[in-house]
Image: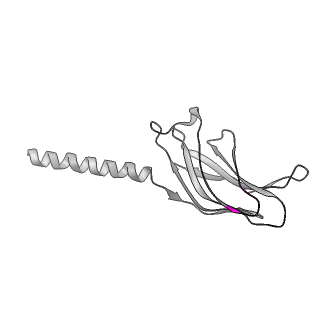
Amino acid sequence: MRKLATAVVAAGLFFGGMGVAVADSWRSAEDISTPGAHFEEVKYRWEPAGAKRGAFRFKGLLRDGSHNDGHNVYLEVRPHDYGWQRFKGVQKRTVPLEGTVHDGATRYTNSAEMRVCRDRGALRPNNCTPARLFKR
């Protein structure tokens, strides 16, 4: 009986740990693009609330799709309807981008939004993709 109880506890710990590993692993998402700006090879994950502030973490390649237009590109991310945080790209280049967004009040949030934009200067409005929603 004691061996059976030990086996059940060990199996529970194993599968519980496996569930935590799956929860913290990187997930893939579709590329986000608008004319002149692309965020490719998108991956994201949620950090544990107790360990890393419950941040929404992402990575991918931010690419300027129109080299001759003279405009920069950027990525905006926000956790659960809080303020947008901007991550700038580089003109005429593709840059690897990895970042985290968090707010003290959003440690346990379960959603985040992301959009990619082309910065067209002060006189013309930027063109951005609709916000893409990510769920925990």
Q: Which residue lies furthest to the right in this view?
A: 123
Determine the residue positioned at 65% across, 51% down. 114
Q: Main secondary structure of the magenta part?
A: loop
Determine the residue positioned at 61% across, 41% down. 80
Q: Can you give x and y, in whole percent of width and height, for residue 68 in the image?
A: 83, 67
Reply above or below: 126 against 5. Answer: below
- Asked if residue 90 lies in the magenta stretch, the reply is yes
> Which colour style is shown?
one colour
Residue 101, by quadrant, is top right
Q: How many marks?
A: 0
What span is colored magenta in the figure?
89-94
Lateral position of residue 129 relative to residue 50, left or right: right
Q: Can you give x and y, in whole percent of width and height, for residue 121 in the image?
A: 86, 52
Q: Give whichever of 90, 28 is nearer the camera.
A: 90
Lateral position of residue 110 relative to residue 37, left or right: left
Q: Residue furthest top?
A: 105
Lateral position of residue 85 relative to residue 134, left or right: right
Determine the residue positioned at 82% across, 58% down. 71
Determine the residue positioned at 48% across, 38% down. 49
Q: Can you give x and y, in whole percent of width and height, for residue 56 in the image?
A: 56, 46
- Asked if residue 2 lies in the magenta stretch, the reply is no
Q: Which residue lies furthest to the left in this view?
A: 1
Q: Give whichever of 70, 81 is nearer the camera.
A: 70
Residue 64, by quadrant, is bottom right
